[in-house]
Amino acid sequence: MQIELLKFPYSYMEYEKILQTRELKVLLPEIEVLSDDKHNTIISGERINLDNVKELTFYRAYKIDGISYPTRQGLYEKDDTLRAVKQHTRYSTHGIHEYKGKFNPQIVHAIANIFGVQRGHKVLDPFDGSGTTIVECAHAGIEAYGTDINPLACLIANTKVAALKMDVEEASVRLYELKRTLSQPMTINIPEGDERLKYLSNWIPMEILCMLESIRNEVENDDPTIRNFFLVVASDLIRDYSYQEPSDLRIRRRKSPMPEVSFLEAYLQKASKYLQKIEQAQSVEDKSFFPDNHAMNCDIKYAKPFGDIKFDAAITSPPYVTALPYIDTQRISLVWLGLCSASEIGRLEASLIGSRELLKSEKTKWASEIAENTGCLPAEIYKLVCSMNESLNENDGFRKQAVPMLVYKYFTEMKSMFINVRSMMKPSGLYGLVVGHNKTTLGGTEYNIDTPYLLAVLAQQCGWQIEELFPLQTYKRYGLNAKNAINRETLIVLRNA
């Protein structure tokens, strides 16, 4: 049998080409590749498993005897509103919220295939973020669970998964009703002592805040899936329409002009767009096909939220050293949704693995831990931290002064994570981590931190076996944070030894 595999029209990056080849070897081990170019791959074999052909990530369709059949990925990515320039990363429910630090869903799908994950297996994402892993697993009918310490991340992730089963017709009717309600003039009173509204009014124009409160009140008693869908869509727009500078990951006062499109128009357009995308995703499979994947709000360093479940594989994109300020970036949404009070923001930010924030009460503790290497970190990591400490001088500000402690804290907490996750895995279970590299300058000395390599060394100390470190090229980043952008990432593959 000879089959023509048809590629997507965008240009593939080198790592996509390599993952594509590896998928073929795992899913179709007995085939011969006759030719491979920009547009298609011709394969041949006596027995070709067509069910596995349908699961390929980097092909939109396959052709047998001149007749084309779509792959599952081809069906999910079928979206005429997107330009065919690069990977489509906002198909299905993936783009409902533009959560910072997401990794491409195709990488998750490809890793799962290369790891041999199938329906009936269970997958864990210890740093689930906005749910890319558990959504992609749901697309393939695979049971998956995630954890994240950020309650907003868990809300977004669970909303995206639940929306795959949402009654789109009912949600569309609800959207029409919301349009009518939100078109009317609205006012709110801020009661004395209402810290939530007082905080929000300081960061959101009153007209927008009135509309947001109206949305929240309107959908409060709706079906939870529909309610959360409308809340998450609104949450995604808050930064753009607030007094927070949208291009700054920190919460600093706005300098750029407000969007020309009104909040109401942007909200209705986004909600309508994603209802269409959800409907399209539901056309790929019956709603009953999608498993009830979900994320738990907990600390993966210690928690075992899924009882006695043993996982076949884990796939994640963890934070790296001095990670994105996930809490600070989304603090207005956290307060608006009632997920966190304004007074709790700093403590929640500092509790994240890889946080750039260090509470005053922690500084003495971590300085002491560095002095004694209390966390028993591997020599390569400890040597790096000591070198950073010695490089500091009086020209380094308070944030720079904290960097060695933050780096030590990061690897100590990642060590706890590796130990905990290993206890949840089946013997020989594979763990894939997509991690960025880091750089910082202390005392005039530039440190290029090979975080993936150091994490692999740390994981090995915790009983994991290093299978591979596979480089991934990332898209070039622009804008405010470009000088510190991570333009290299690595897939760490570990095995539960």
Image (cartoon, rainbow, N blue to C red):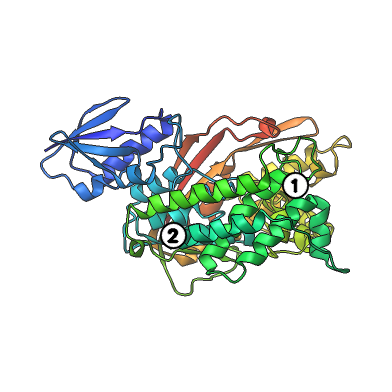
Residue 429 or residue 139, whichever sits in front: 139
Rendering coords of residue 318 (x, y %): 56, 50
Q: In this picture, is 165 found above or below 81?
A: below
Q: In this picture, is 96 found above or below 173?
A: above
Quadrant for the C terminus, please: bottom left
Rendering coords of residue 266 (x, y %): 61, 45
Q: In this picture, is 477 found above or below 142?
A: above
> Which mark sits nearer the N-terminus, 1 or 2?
2
Three-letter residue code for mark 2? Glu
Give the class, few, some or many, for how many residues have Cα within 10 Å of label 2's Cα (few <14, many ≥20): few
Residue 135 or residue 52, whichever sits in front: 135
Give the residue displayed 61% in from the left and 49% down from the top.
267
Rendering coords of residue 158 (x, y %): 52, 62
Q: What label sits on residue 169 in the rendered view?
A: 2
The residue carrying mark 1 is: 242
Give the class, few, some or many, for how many residues have Cα within 10 Å of label 1's Cα (few <14, many ≥20): many
Q: What label sits on residue 156 in the rendered view?
A: none
Horizontal side of residue 31 vs 13, given as left or right: left
**Separation of marks 1 and 2 at Cα, in angstroms:** 31 Å
